[in-house]
Image: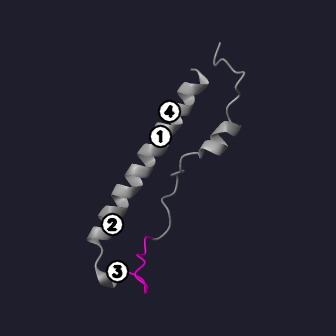
Amino acid sequence: MPVTGVKVWFQNRRTKHKRTEQEEEAKRSSSKRPSDQRPGGVASDGPASPGVTPPLSPESMDEHIDPDDDGPE
């Protein structure tokens, strides 16, 4: 797979992750009652789900791509 294909794949992955997080946050905030919030209006979500890793940033993605690599042979 060419480098540009890998970059597009990661970009799509990040976009999907961001959209999913926004949808979940909207669902959580619409279902929260005022008594479920911390003082100051910040909702308490608890710890992050184990085993879920956020997508790579473009900067860190570039560190993992070898521009001279033509893929599997």
Position of residue 40 measured from the top left corner of the image (x, y, whole percent): 43, 85
Report the residue at 66% width, 17% height from top. 70
Amino acid type at circle 4 is: Trp
Please tell me whether residue 55 belongs to the stretch shown in magenta.
Answer: no
Amino acid type at circle 3 is: Asp
Lower sequence index among marks 2 and 1: 1
Disc 2 target residue: 28
Determine contact: label 2, label 4, CB under 8 Å.
Answer: no
Position of residue 68 measured from the top left corner of the image (x, y, whole percent): 72, 21
Lower sequence index among marks 4 and 3: 4
- Residue 5 to residue 59: above or below: above
Disc 1 target residue: 13
Position of residue 10 measured from the top left corner of the image (x, y, whole percent): 53, 37
Q: Which range is magenta?
A: 37-45
Determine contact: label 2, label 1, CB under 8 Å.
Answer: no
Disc 3 target residue: 36
Report the residue at 50% width, 32% height from top. 9
